[in-house]
Image (cartoon, rainbow, N blue to C red):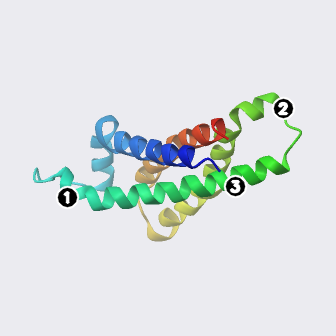
Amino acid sequence: MNILAVLIAAAAMFVIGFLWHGPLFGKTWMRLAGVIPTGQEKLSDMVPQMVWNYVANVVVAGVFAVMLGFIGSLVTDTPAFFDEYRGAIFAAWMWFGFSMPISAYNVIWMKESKKLWFFELSSQLASFLAMGAIIGAWR
C-alpha cells in the first residue's frame, strides 16, 4: 500500500466534499438538508468535525488500497484498459455495490429524502472515482 497515495486520496475526498457541499452546490445541499444558515457559522467551530472527516477518509482510502491490491494480485490477465483505469473502475463498483445500497437503507427505513440521497450519492461517486484514480495510478 502506498501511504502517500492513501493520504492524498483522503485529502481529495475531503476537498471534493467541501466543494460539493459548499461553492459548487451548497445552496442546493442546504435546501435539501433543511440547513438554515444563521450567519454566525465559523470555520474554526467546524475543525473537530473536519479532522474526524479526514480520519474517516483515510480509513476508506486505506481499506480501498488494500482491497485494490488484493484484487489486483488475483486478476493477472486483464485488458490494458483495465490496468490503466483499474482504480477508478474498482471505485465505481465499490460505490455501486456497497455505498449506494447501504445508504439506501436510510431512505427505505428512515424515510430520508430521496433527493438528498441522490445528492449525497453523487458526491460520494465523485469522491470514490477520484480516490480510485489516485490510488490506482500510484500502485
Q: CA distance from mark 2 to mark 1?
A: 49 Å
* Nearer to the camera, 34 or 129: 129
Of badges 2 and 3, the one in the foreground is 3
- Above/below status of 28 relative to 61: above
Relative image position of residue 80 (x, y in whole percent): 81, 29
Residue holding disc 3: 67
State which tag comes first along the sequence, 2 or 1: 1
Q: Furthest-bottom residue in view?
A: 109
Residue located at (27% from left, 42% from top) = 27
| Disc 2 to disc 3, C-alpha distance | 20 Å
The residue pinned by badge 2 equals 79
Category of crowding for the residue at label 3, using alpha-carbon neighbours closer than 10 angstroms: few (below 14), some (14–19), many (at least 20): some
Q: Residue at x 60, y 50 (%)?
A: 95
Q: Earlier in the sequence, mark 1 or mark 3?
A: 1
User: Residue 95, which numbered label?
Assistant: none
Report the residue marked by disc 1: 45
- Residue for point 39% across, 42% down: 15
Amino acid carrying label 3: it is Met
Instruction: Judge whether 91 appears above or below 33 on screen.
Output: above
Q: N-terminal of the two: label 2 or label 3?
A: 3
Label 1's element?
A: helix
Residue 16 placement (x, y as % from top left): 42, 41
What type is the residue that disc 1 sits on? Asp
